[in-house]
Amino acid sequence: MTTEIKSQLEKIALAKTIPFCYGCYKEAESGKCKTCGSDDLMRLLPGSGCEYGTDWVIKELLAENLEPVDVDEAFEEFVRDSYPQSVTIGWMTFDAVSIMKEMDPVSWNCAESEWESQMSDEDLISFDNGSTHYWRSDLEGFIEGHAL
């Protein structure tokens, strides 16, 4: 399913960019430069620049239109939903997340990594090896909104 989303994003990136001959510094909308005849063209995204390929265009479009997922925050929310109870120590009350993170940060980090790995197979998608994540539903909404 991730490859399908990637494929749809590539189609959007191609539709939003213009073939560009960097050697002649001219747009080549036909897919071949009319001046030099080259078909080794970059992709020009008006207002952003030009470069080879579509990965950078996808990254630009997603950065402009979607909010990346804060994985730490999303995991904390997941744990809070799973363990909503509070812990009272003396006169102080803490939520379970605060106690778990403080008392065993190694276990917390392992659990977060495992959760992220499981979510990456289902709902959490990254196109840059885990540096930036997006919710699948947000990506699908973006694709629907830019349907070709």
Image: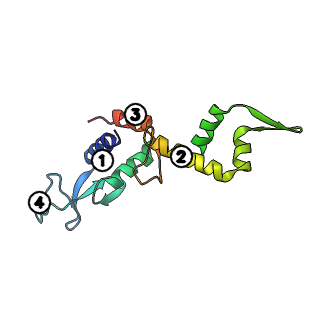
Instruction: Name the quadrant containing residue 129.
Output: bottom left
Given the image, on which type of amino acid does mark 3 rest? Gly
Question: Label 1 crowding class (10 Å Cα cut-off): few <14, some 14-19, many 20+?
Answer: many
Question: Label 3 crowding class (10 Å Cα cut-off): few <14, some 14-19, many 20+?
Answer: few
The x, y position of residue 68, in whole percent, is 49, 45
The x, y position of residue 51, in whole percent, is 30, 60
Number of the front mark, 2 or 4:
2
Q: Earlier in the sequence, mark 1 or mark 4?
A: 1
- Vertical placement of 70 versus 50: above or below? above
- Vertical placement of 26 versus 87: above or below? below
Number of the front mark, 4 or 3:
3
Under circle 3, the secondary element is helix
Q: Is residue 67 left or right of residue 24?
A: right
Give the camera-side residue of 68 and 38: 68
Give the camera-side residue of 99 and 69: 99
Q: Earlier in the sequence, mark 2 or mark 1?
A: 1
Q: Earlier in the sequence, mark 4 or mark 3?
A: 4
User: Looking at the rendering, in which quadrant would you find the C terminus?
Assistant: top left
The x, y position of residue 137, in whole percent, is 43, 34
Under circle 4, the secondary element is loop
Tell me the residue that label 4 is attached to.
34
